[in-house]
């Protein structure tokens, strides 16, 4: 039996070299620290910041229970709607049906091609444009009608406005995800007798998730911040509206209340970033050839006890 | 007896590119047909026409007496609705060069996917049958492994089990061993040989001349979208009649 020993019997001494010096990094760091200290000192001593007002309103009940809660609700509801609509639009865009393709393209063209602020103003004006909504036979009798102006629905209109705009971006993200799944996958499904819809649902979309999740996390963070634009509807009970419109106008102190709003936006985005990190890690399982720590341990164990290299059996 | 596959002057073109220029052949029930030829000769395209992954432009293709991809009403052909095309494909298993296993499902889940989703077989029954199939291809201990954790040869054997799970009457193999390490080719060919000996009708596009000689009832040599030569594999391989066949075989044998 040929006994091939792959591990060297005497390993060479580890390299002990003088590490490369980086003097300019130190210089840059010192300059930046000086600048930061100057800025913090300036901000702390500048009367315009009104830190007393900032402290007073940071944990204000109305800021938290109305402003923050409304902002979170707007983000959640519009994002869920946008994702559902985005899946529909992406699947339509990629479907073999030319009518679906065209509808999806036109939708994307309009909703990506106009600013979200303009769209929100438009949705705010909806009750003015369409005062009455009636269901019935076209040019025939009306079965059902209600007056839009009688309803007070700025919150709903804000969600609709944000969701419709966002769905156009989500559709593109989902389309990219679907396109990233190799063609062989849908071919294998087709060859097994699966329909187009079943192929999408069972084979393509689950694999597309890996590509879809990270940018969707970005979109959630982006949506949280975009909710500050709902004042265009106008809906003013979100975090930005409560702090910078309501309270700041009452206190004549715009700067500290802007800081309060910024603080809470930053807190929520930080939490979302942590969540995104774990989601990304979860969905990248099996995507890389790199072995996980667990797998490496298992392999090392196998090497210790077993055959690789042919040296093990004889011992 | 109706042949399992009957091709009459089958033509297929992609735009101006004519890939198949009138293929006529027959595969009887329980027979194995091997197709060989240089790349670009149209072998894979013909195979994909048999289960309607590609639509035939001219000629007729029948599987078990049933016209593929079209419905014949009087003298006119009507394009087949996707639902019916899917139904035809259920009885035709296909194995791909690059396996195309579902990477997000385990070996066993890959095998039961189509029976459960397409044929609505009860999950417990599908699982039992799936385990049995994995055993037949020698992979019962890999049932819970994901494709990425399997070698190429193992993946291809799972892919064969997946195709068999639909109880096909015909199996199509598109260069099943071309993407494998030479060491792993044998295990896949062994499974295919066993399948052939059990009476499965098979159409195999391959470069494995040894397999063709040993297992095939009929060998077809294709070049430039036409059948150049066909017949008993031993005779064709030992004594090719056409210059083109001679030139090709002298390179691969």
Image (cartoon, helix red, strand yellow):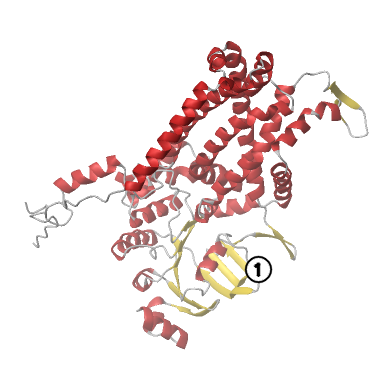
x and y, in percent, of residue B252 in the image: 37, 78
Q: Residue at position x 69%, y 45% from top?
A: A108
Which of these two is toward me, B67 or B123? Answer: B123
x and y, in percent, of residue A213 in the image: 51, 39
Q: Residue at position x 39%, y 85% from top?
A: B239
x and y, in percent, of residue A86 in the image: 63, 39
Badge 1 is on which residue? B57
Q: Residue at position x 63%, y 23% from top?
A: A240
- Residue A191 in view of the camera: yes
- Up/down of A270 relative to B210, above or below: above
Picture quarter with the C terminus of chain B: bottom left
Which of these two is toward me, B194 or A289? Answer: A289
- Up/down of A13 relative to B40, above or below: above
> Helix, strand, or loop for circle 1?
loop
- Up/down of B224 relative to A262, above or below: below
Task: Identify the image quadrant of residue A255.
Answer: top right
B150 sits left or right of A108 in the view: left
The number of callouts visible is 1
Q: Mark 1, residues whose alpha carbon is within 10 Å: few (<14), some, or many (≥20)?
A: few
- Subunit bearing disc 1: B
Which of these two is toward me, B138 or A124? Answer: A124
Which of these two is toward me, A130 or A262? Answer: A262
Task: Identify the image quadrant of residue A220.
Answer: top right
Q: Residue at position x 53%, y 24% from top?
A: A263
Task: Identify the image quadrant of residue A232.
Answer: top right
- Residue A274 in view of the camera: no
x and y, in percent, of residue B46 in the image: 54, 68
């Amino acid at each position: 039996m040929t006994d091939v020993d792959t591990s060297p019997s005497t390993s060479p001494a580890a390299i002990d070299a003088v590490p490369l010096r980086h003097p300019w990094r130190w210089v840059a760091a010192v300059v930046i620290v000086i600048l930061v200290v100057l800025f913090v000192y300036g901000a702390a001593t500048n009367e315009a910041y009104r830190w007393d007002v900032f402290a007073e309103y940071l944990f204000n009940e109305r800021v938290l229970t109305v402003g923050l809660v409304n902002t979170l609700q707007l983000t959640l509801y519009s994002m869920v709607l946008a994702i559902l609509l985005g899946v529909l639009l992406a699947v339509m865009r990629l479907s073999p049906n030319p009518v679906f393709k065209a509808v999806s393209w036109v939708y994307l063209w309009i909703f990506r091609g106009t600013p979200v602020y303009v769209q929100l103003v438009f949705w705010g004006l909806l009750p003015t444009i369409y005062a009455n909504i009636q269901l019935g036979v076209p040019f025939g009798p009306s079965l059902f009608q209600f007056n839009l102006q009688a309803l007070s629905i700025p919150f709903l209109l804000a969600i609709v406005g944000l969701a419709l705009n966002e769905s156009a971006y989500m559709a593109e993200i989902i389309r990219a995800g679907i396109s990233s799944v190799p063609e062989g996958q849908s071919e294998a499904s087709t060859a097994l007798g699966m329909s187009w819809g079943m192929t999408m649902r069972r084979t393509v979309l689950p694999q597309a998730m890996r590509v879809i999740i990270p940018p969707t996390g970005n979109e959630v963070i982006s949506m949280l911040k975009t909710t500050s634009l709902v004042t265009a509807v106008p809906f003013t009970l979100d975090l930005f509206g409560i702090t910078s419109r309501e309270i700041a106008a009452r206190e004549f102190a715009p700067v500290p209340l802007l800081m309060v709003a910024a603080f809470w936006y930053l807190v929520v985005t930080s939490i979302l970033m942590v969540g995104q990190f774990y989601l990304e890690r979860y969905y990248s399982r099996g995507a890389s050839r790199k072995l996980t720590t667990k797998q490496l341990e298992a392999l090392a164990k196998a090497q210790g006890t077993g055959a690789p290299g042919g040296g093990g059996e004889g011992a | 007896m109706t042949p399992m596959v009957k091709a009459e002057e089958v033509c297929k073109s992609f735009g101006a590119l004519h890939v198949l220029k009138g293929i006529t052949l027959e595969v009887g029930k329980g027979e194995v047909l091997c197709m060989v030829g240089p790349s670009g000769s149209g072998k894979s395209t013909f195979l994909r026409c048999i289960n309607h992954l590609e639509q035939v432009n001219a000629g007729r293709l029948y599987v078990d007496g049933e016209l593929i991809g079209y419905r014949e009403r009087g003298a006119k052909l009507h394009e087949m609705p996707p639902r019916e095309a899917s139904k035809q494909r259920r009885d035709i298993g296909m194995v791909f060069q690059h396996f195309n296993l579902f990477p997000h499902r385990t070996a066993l889940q890959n095998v039961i996917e189509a029976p459960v989703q397409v044929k609505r077989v009860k999950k417990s029954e599908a699982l039992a049958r799936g385990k049995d199939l994995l055993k037949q291809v020698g992979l019962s201990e890999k049932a819970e492994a994901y494709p990425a954790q399997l070698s190429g040869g193992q993946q291809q054997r799972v892919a064969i089990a997946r195709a068999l799970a639909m109880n096909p009457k015909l199996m199509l193999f598109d260069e099943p061993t071309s993407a494998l390490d030479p060491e792993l080719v044998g295990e896949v060919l062994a499974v295919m040989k066993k399948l052939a000996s059990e009476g499965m009708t098979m159409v195999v596009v391959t470069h494995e001349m040894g397999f063709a000689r040993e297992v095939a009832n009929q060998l077809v040599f294709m070049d430039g979208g036409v059948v150049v030569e066909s017949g008993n594999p031993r005779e064709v391989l030992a004594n090719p009649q056409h210059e083109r066949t001679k030139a090709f075989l002298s390179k691969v044998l």
